[in-house]
Image: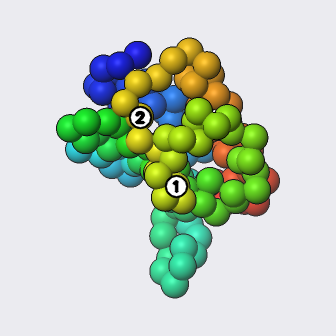
Amino acid sequence: MEDIEEIRQFLIELLEIYVPPLQVRKNSPQVFEVAGCIPTMQGKQKVEGFYFGSVVPKPKDTRLYFFPIYTHPEEFVFISPELRKCLKGKSCFHFKKLNEEMKTEIKQMIRKAIDVYQKHELI
């Protein structure tokens, strides 16, 4: 999969599987954002749900902002070097293309994140 729009759709569909316990906060061509449904403190402010992630298309790639890898990095040490290479900074994956192995791994990573956030009562 090398089409940026196809990658965007794939990532959005993966996140939509988990609505609920996630809720869609933004859904536009510029950003798709999901968060938990439990009112909680995030930093110093009360929010309607703990931020989980966003899919943002850019001209040369599609980005997955994936907050669980920032809040619980020890839970994601299993990700492959190929997937880790797409991680820019602490929580943003840049995807220009996806093969079947990476797609499977992203599915597993999101499932793991849902489990971790539910265990910690964040979603």
Looking at the rendered image, the quarter that the N terminus falls into is top left
- For label 1, the SS is loop
- Residue at 20 percent across and 38 percent down: it is 59
Looking at the rendered image, the quarter that the C terminus falls into is bottom right
Mark 1 is on which residue type?
Answer: Ser
- Residue at 52 percent across and 84 percent down: it is 44
Q: Is residue 14 left or right of residue 26?
A: right
Residue position marked by numbered label 1 in the rendering: 91
Q: Is residue 120 at all visible to an observer of this figure?
A: yes
The location of residue 51, given as percent across then percent down, is 51, 59
Mark 2 is on which residue type?
Answer: Phe
Report which quarter residue 82 is drawn in.
top right
- Residue at 31 percent across and 36 percent down: it is 61
Crowding around mark 1 (Cα neighbors within 10 Å: few <14, some 14 to 19, many 20+) is some
Q: Is residue 74 left or right of residue 48?
A: right
Mark drawn on residue 95: 2
Report which quarter residue 36 is drawn in.
bottom right
